[in-house]
Image: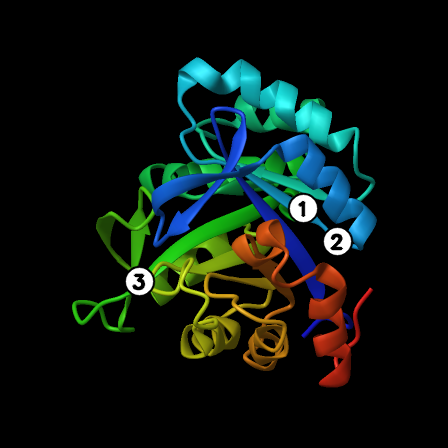
Amino acid sequence: MSLSIRVIPCLDVADGRVVKGVNFLNLRDAGDPIELAARYYADGADELTFLDVHATVDNRSTMYDLVTACAEQIFIPLTVGGGIREVDDVAKLLAAGADKVSVGSAGISNPNLLQQISQRFGNQVLVISLDLKRSPNTPSGYVVTTHGGRNETDLDALAWVSRTIELGAGELLVNSIDADGTRAGFDQEMLREVRALAKVPVIASGGAGKAEDFPVAAAAGADAILAASIFHEGSVTISQAKAALKAAGYETR
């Protein structure tokens, strides 16, 4: 476990706006990404994650502009994901102001891409986005999904975790599709199993509903904890999440 637990707001962006749904469905508007980035930086966020949920070629230029605009508002690490298909995409995002990139589907279809990113930019740049779902059809009981959980692959989640680490993963963003947007708490069992395999930092995602969920995720092995809806709507603030972690004995930045 890292010395301090990081708290990371996530901006899921579509068509220039922050959106949020439940289990990646029924997306609704949640605000302006630049305004939210500035607010979260002021509120004490340790990092910020920016995910382009549509990630089509048509809005690539818009995304780069948004990344630059967000990066100009904050002085904390910015991770950007969505639509990364080749190494040059990473170079462009880093040039636009990103510090790290989050890669999901492209790494599944082309595992060599992960190794290429890690070798060219260093593994500290490469965050593996893992949208994992409970499944009776895999040895571990979890399957890797794509397209926001709608498409199941034939990859066992824990086997894929091990493979991504071999290929140069610097961090693992572990998102529970079953818990995403439900506010019912993080999938502790899933986090513990990934933590047992991983020698790199693990970011918990999917299910945050209250401040007390944060130390629970930390106890399950998370080095960082990501949330979206509760921060966007103000039901939990970053300072409240950090206070809950501190009260449970965890250090925060």
Would you place residue 130 above or below residue 188 in this image? above
Q: Which of marks 2 and 3 is nearer the N terminus?
A: 2
Helix, strand or loop at disc 2? Answer: loop
The C terminus - image quarter? bottom right
When asked about the image quadrant of residue 224, the answer is: bottom right
Residue 237 place in picture, x, y as percent: 69, 61
Relative to residue 3, is residue 217 drawn left or right?
Answer: left
Which residue bears the numbered disc 2? Answer: 45
Label 1 and label 2: CA atoms lie apart by: 7 Å
Left or right: 153 in relation to 20: left
Could you say which disc has been placed on residue 133 in the image? 3
Residue 102 visible from this viewpoint: yes
Q: Residue 48 carries which label?
A: 1
* Above or below, 2 relative to 229: below
- The amino acid marked with disc number 1 is Leu
Measured along the vertical axis of the image, is residue 173 above or below residue 239? Answer: above
For disc 2, the neighbor class at 10 Å (few under 14, some 14 to 19, many from 20) is many
Is label 2 or label 3 in front? 2
